[in-house]
Every structure is written in C-alpha cells, then in structure tokens.
Amino acid sequence: MGSILDAKGLNCPLPILRAKKALKDIAVGEILQVHATDPGSVKDFEAFCRQTGHELVESLEAGGIYTYQIKRTS
C-alpha cells in the first residue's frame, strides 16, 4: 500500500520537502501518495521525480486536491 502524506494547505516548496523526507522512510518499490492543494505542485512533482529518479506513477486533480503517487526507486 505505501504511505500517505497530507500536504494540503502548504505552498511550494513545502510539499516537495515533506515528500522527500517521507520517501526516505519507505522501502524501495513502495508508493508514497501525496495530497496537495498548491496548483504549482504539478510541475514541482514532475521536476522532482525527473531529478531524483523516483517514478511519478500517477498525478490527478479533483476538487482542487492534487494527488500524486510516487514510487520510490532508490
């Protein structure tokens, strides 16, 4: 299943910083689900995953809530 990080109400760069820390606490291959409300987080998480090598499995938006599924790769 993985872990869930609630980053709603936080603005850049806090969702990324919290996700980076949370990814260290899960096993390689596990999924971190992040919930955010900052519209800028879409580009931030795409760039974060590109730079770190973690896999952005899914990126959704519904009702102003952005949900990201990030698979830890290393």
Image (spheres, helix red, strand yellow):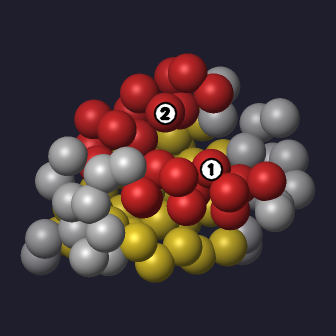
Kindly identify which residue carries mark 2: 48
Image quadrant assignment for residue 45: top left
Give the x, y percent position of residue 33: 54, 65
Name the one closer to the observer, 41 or 63: 41
Amino acid at dot 2: Phe
Q: Left or right: where does residue 39 sit relative to residue 16?
A: left
Judge whether residue 38 can be spotted in this image. yes
- For the C terminus, the image quarter is top right
Kindly identify which residue carries mark 1: 20
Amino acid at dot 1: Lys
Image quadrant assignment for residue 9: bottom left
The residue tagged with tag 2: helix, strand or loop? helix
Q: Is residue 31 above or below residue 50?
A: below
Give the x, y percent position of residue 27: 87, 56
Image quadrant assignment for residue 65: bottom left
Which residue is painted at 85% across and 47% down in the image?
28
Instruction: Check if mark 2's residue and mark 1's residue have beta carbons within 8 Å.
Output: yes
